Amino acid sequence: MDGLICIRIVRPDGEPIEVERWQALIESDPELTPIEFVEGVNPRTHERVRVPYKQPAAVWSAHPEGYTNSPFVFAYEDGLITAVCIDRPFATKGAEIAQQLNARIVETLD
């Protein structure tokens, strides 16, 4: 792969996705688990850090390669859902989520 796929899930009419619909989808999809933060390592200090999510987020646990050490996270941000640093199977899951929310994917390659 030449870069990282980054996606935003947005409504085609420009209206925000309702946070309640996103939360309901998280609760109804067995492949999604709600999370309040993601853990990582500060590249400067090498200390473990927790980065909190201010709005609902979920980790996807059904990657076909069985990855468990990299969190595949969908995060709600001001009426849209974002996912960064992802691969093609994760983008496909994003498309499934978009369809369930009557939304569309805006995809970039970084």
Image (cartoon, rainbow, N blue to C red):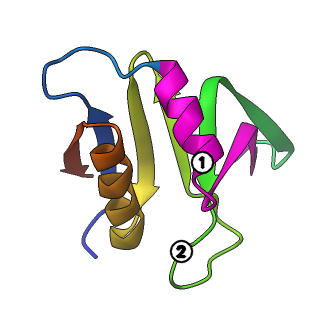
Magenta range? 19-42
Is the C-beta separation of discs 1 and 2 under 8 Å?
no
Above-or-below relation of 51 to 4: above
Residue at 34% from the left image edge and 60% from the top image edge? 91
Q: Between 44 and 69, which is closer to the camera in this rendering?
A: 69
Residue at 63% from the left image edge and 66% from the top image edge? 61
Q: Residues within 10 Å of mark 1 (few under 14, many from 20)?
A: few
Task: Report the residue marked by disc 2.
Answer: 63
Q: Is residue 44 left or right of residue 25?
A: right
Q: Residue furthest bottom?
A: 65
20 falls in the magenta region: yes
Q: Gap in Å between the C-alphas at discs 1 and 2?
A: 18 Å
Q: Is residue 95 left or right of residue 14?
A: right
Evaluate whether residue 4 shows in this view.
no
Residue 33: percent from left, percent from top: 69, 51
Task: Report the residue marked by disc 1.
Answer: 28
Residue at 53% from the left image edge and 21% from the top image edge? 20
Above-or-below relation of 6 to 90: above
Label 1: element kind? helix
Q: Is residue 86 left or right of residue 44?
A: left
Q: Is residue 50 left or right of residue 71?
A: right
